[in-house]
Amino acid sequence: MKSFFNELLEYNRQMNQKIILAMVQQKDKVSEKSLKWMNHILNAQELFHTRIDPAYKAYGSWHMRELEELESVNNDLHQVTAGILTRFEMDTKIHYTTTTGLAMQNTVQDIIFHIINHGTYHRGQIAADFRNTGLEPLVTDYVIWKRYQ
């Protein structure tokens, strides 16, 4: 199971990188909305790291980083998440507080799956926004990524 999640995390990292690179190459055409969603994808991943291991620090879920920072942030977050998979069992229960102050509990597996699913959801929003602003949306589907691995 962990090997499958590692594969999903690599897919997630590569698709984030693909979008970040497209944003850097077309910086003058990328909307603030797309940049905000890309930051949010990364910030949420970072936030869930702190829920699993409070030693990690995170910005707020809508914190804005400079576009030029996002590639290294994405790679760093990937390494941290892969490390979490190494250090924790998938069924380990994580108790945490949400950003609205609610006490919650999920397994590491739930959280890792959420990180991947959350990124996919917002990459879809970025694709729609790219189209609306005259940019070509990128193909970031898992099955298409998998075909070329």
Image (tube, grey):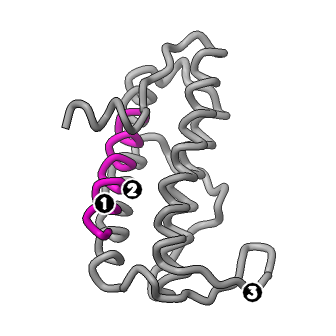
Q: CA distance from mark 2 to mark 1?
A: 23 Å
In reply to whether residue 2 is colored magenta, the answer given is yes
Within the image, what quadrant is residue 36 found in?
A: top right
Q: Helix, strand or loop at disc 2?
A: helix
Residue 69 position, x and y percent, is: 41, 49
Q: Nearer the viewer, mark 2 or mark 1?
A: 1
Amino acid under label 2? Val
User: Which of disc 1 and disc 3 is earlier in sequence?
Assistant: 1
Q: Nearer the viewer, residue 23 or 99?
A: 99
Residue 66 position, x and y percent, is: 49, 45
Q: Which mark is residue 73?
A: 2
User: Which of disc 1 and disc 2 is earlier in sequence?
Assistant: 1
The residue beneath circle 1 is 4
Quadrant of the snapshot with the N terminus: bottom left
Residue 4 position, x and y percent, is: 30, 60
Amino acid under label 3? Ala
Residue 44 is left or right of residue 10, and the answer is right
Q: Classify 22 as above or below 2.
A: above
Q: Residue at x 48, y 25 (%)?
A: 27
Q: Residue at x 38, y 63 (%)?
A: 77
Q: Nearer the viewer, mark 3 or mark 1?
A: 1
The residue beneath circle 3 is 103
Q: CA distance from mark 3 to mark 1?
A: 29 Å
Q: Helix, strand or loop at disc 1?
A: helix
Q: Which residues are magenta?
A: 1-19
Residue 81 position, x and y percent, is: 37, 69
